Image: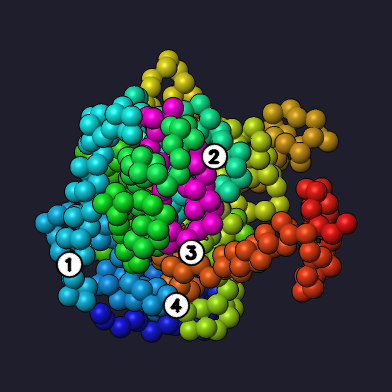
């Protein structure tokens, strides 16, 4: 395994100093001026990767901005980091692991040998088993305990073991087998599991328990309750041979932890594995995508993987100046750093992409929400933004007011498709018109002079003025296909990696989620016990524990 490139503190480089000076010159220049002075801008600041057309012309940048951002990327050795990731170097240095999600989507004919193991071959061994299983479920050959085919799939998982397949199943619903009901349960809140199961026939329901570690409390608790629900519904006593048979017909696992899967009672023959070099939020293209593969079928799942691979090849081989995920990452750094943009909006103009913002929230915020660099030193400036969003037209009637006239600068991605899955009269033209109109309005606004020229009452002119100069990226594709979805996800994965390299942080660990888990493990005992709340909590938490214990009929006295 090769070693890692040097970690360079970008803000201490001459390239960064040049960017600071450049920002002072161009930071306040209006997009109106940039477009007026550069008639070819829209043709130059657009690129194609796979089926995606990405237009970044409505950003507050010039050729010189890109030249300087790319120089900064070279100063921090971005090309070497890209190569390190692909070669299996321990890019996830704080967990001492390789980062090889790109191996999950390489064609069978490729090979990627890390520590003497061809990981692409291992990936395809698992994919072949997934295909066999998915085909059996889809054809009705996989029978439940009572000999009936499976019609309901309930995926139990959380974080990366939920958001990816849940988002993709929604996004690709038009490709899913309509005979199958696919549901997702993630929250420890029992109401979610109840809602997902109460109207299902246990005899026709299969649970896919997805957990990389198989120790995640939400998932294990939900899986145990699902097992009780199944056995109760089938009238079987837990632990009986019949119950064990039922569990083996109605539960499969996706995990890296064969021991814990076996302890839970799932037959290891029904476990689909992956590897510690797949981060949870980078795992939708691993066996974690099993529910998706069952829904859309192995061929479409193969197209999905192919979409990722198209963007991977682009990321690895394209020079920085024309590398689209890299350019988007550099823009992310530009706004975070120089414009104080604390949030980034993801605005899909597609009903089927409603869960994309939540998916990208984990991808971006769990990856780049860090304040310590790889070398353990504190960062000396901002890192990843807050990511948020909902489908665009709904947002237009809610929070776009702030995007247009508020005091925060919110760079946004607008995502749309030339063709809908279902063409209903004029709906799609109206949808696309809204996407284009919003990007135009955000960028160019409406001046006080234009407002006044329309005869607006003088006292209303400032209210009705749109400052514009609000940056957006427009991402278009012909249709939302499995391949296009793979391309979209890979585009963001590599954008996030680029930003992490610029900031010198490890985008692949998530230590920040650990403390809360440990405290919850302790508090649950205190909440359910009758003993006095032990010392050690702050007075607020101790009081809240007491109140909830009293309301739940627990605690002393
Ligand atoms: O708590 C955060 C996290 O570890 C995520 O990184 C991960 O995607 C999620 O929990 C689920 O983890 P697992 O797949 O191990 O259950």
Which numbered disc flags the more N-terminal residue, 2 or 4? Answer: 4
In the image, which disc is placed on residue 193?
2
Q: Which residue is mark 3?
A: 367
CB-based contact (under 8 Å), mark 2 and mark 4: no
Residue at mark 2: C-beta within 8 A of ligand 1: no
State the quadrant of the C terminus. bottom right
Q: Marks 2/3: CA distance? A: 28 Å
Disc on the earlier residue, 2 or 3 = 2
Image: magenta residue range: 201-230
In this view, the residue in front, 464 or 32, is 464
Q: CA distance from mark 2 to mark 1?
A: 39 Å
User: Exactly how many numbered labels are in the figure?
Assistant: 4
149 lies above or below 492: above
Check contact, mark 1 vs mark 3: CB within 8 A: no
Would residue 304 be visible to someone looking at this image?
Answer: yes
| Dot 3 or dot 4, earlier in sequence | 4
Can you tell which of label 2 and label 3 is closer to the viewer?
A: 2
Give left or right: position of 536 versus 241.
right
Q: How far apart are the alpha carbons under marks 2 and 4?
A: 35 Å
Q: Is residue 169 above or below residue 545?
A: above
How many angstroms separate mark 1 from mark 4 (CA)?
24 Å
Q: Is residue 449 above or below residue 554?
A: above
Left or right, 375 with reference to 421: right
User: Residue 309's x, y, as percent?
Assistant: 25, 53
Residue 209 colored magenta?
yes
Secondary structure under tag 1 reads: strand
The reply to whether the residue tagged 1 has its Cβ within 8 angstroms of ligand 1 is no
At x 35% / y 24%, what residue is drawn? 178
């Amino acid at each position: 395994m090769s070693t890692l490139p040097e970690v360079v503190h970008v803000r201490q480089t001459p390239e960064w100093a040049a960017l600071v000076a450049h920002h002072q010159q161009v930071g306040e220049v209006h997009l109106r001026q940039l477009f007026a002075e550069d008639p070819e801008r829209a043709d130059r600041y657009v690129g194609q990767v796979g089926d995606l057309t990405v237009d970044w012309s409505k950003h507050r940048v010039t050729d010189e901005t890109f030249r300087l951002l790319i120089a900064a990327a070279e100063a921090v050795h971005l090309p070497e980091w890209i190569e390190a990731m692909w070669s299996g170097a321990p890019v996830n240095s704080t967990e001492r692991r390789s980062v090889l999600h790109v191996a999950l989507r390489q064609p069978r004919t490729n090979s990627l040998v890390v520590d003497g193991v061809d990981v692409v071959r291992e990936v395809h061994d698992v994919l072949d088993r997934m295909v066999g299983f998915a085909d059996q479920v889809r054809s009705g050959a996989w029978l439940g305990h009572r000999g009936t085919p499976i019609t309901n799939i309930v995926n139990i998982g959380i974080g990366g073991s939920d958001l990816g397949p849940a988002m993709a199943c929604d996004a690709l619903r038009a490709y899913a087998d309509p005979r199958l009901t696919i549901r997702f349960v993630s929250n420890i809140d029992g109401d979610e599991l109840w809602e997902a199961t109460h109207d299902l026939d246990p005899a026709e329901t299969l649970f896919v328990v997805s957990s990389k570690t198989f120790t995640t409390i939400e998932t294990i608790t939900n899986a145990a309750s699902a097992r009780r629900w199944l056995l109760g519904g089938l009238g079987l006593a837990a632990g009986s041979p019949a119950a064990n048979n039922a569990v083996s017909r109605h539960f499969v696992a996706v995990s890296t932890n064969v021991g814990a899967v076996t302890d839970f009672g799932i037959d290891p023959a029904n476990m689909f594995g992956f590897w510690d070099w797949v981060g949870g939020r980078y795992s939708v293209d691993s066996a974690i995508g099993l529910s998706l593969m069952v829904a859309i079928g192995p061929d479409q799942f193969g197209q999905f993987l192919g979409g990722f691979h198209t963007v991977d090849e682009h990321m690895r081989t394209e020079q920085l100046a024309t590398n689209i995920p890299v350019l988007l990452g550099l823009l992310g750094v530009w706004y975070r750093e120089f414009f104080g943009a604390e949030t980034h909006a993801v605005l899909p103009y597609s009903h089927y992409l409603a869960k994309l913002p939540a998916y990208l929230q984990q991808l971006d915020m769990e990856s780049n929400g860090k304040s310590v660099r790889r070398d353990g030193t504190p960062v000396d400036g901002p890192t990843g933004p807050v990511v948020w969003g909902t489908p665009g037209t709904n947002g237009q009637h809610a929070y776009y007011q702030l995007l247009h006239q508020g005091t925060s600068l919110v760079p946004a991605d607008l995502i749309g498709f030339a063709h809908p899955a279902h063409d209903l009269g004029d709906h799609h033209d109206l949808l696309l018109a809204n996407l284009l109109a919003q990007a135009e309005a955000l960028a160019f606004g409406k001046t006080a002079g234009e407002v006044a020229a329309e005869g607006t009452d003088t006292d209303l002119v400032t209210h009705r003025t749109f400052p514009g100069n609000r940056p957006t990226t427009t991402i278009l594709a012909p249709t939302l296909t499995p391949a296009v979805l793979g391309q979209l996800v890979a585009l963001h994965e590599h954008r996030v990696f680029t930003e992490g390299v610029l900031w010198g942080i490890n985008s692949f660990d998530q230590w920040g989620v650990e403390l809360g888990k440990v405290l919850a493990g302790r508090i649950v005992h205190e909440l359910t016990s009758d003993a006095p709340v032990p010392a050690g909590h702050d007075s607020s938490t101790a009081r809240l524990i007491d109140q909830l214990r009293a309301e739940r009929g627990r605690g002393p006295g």
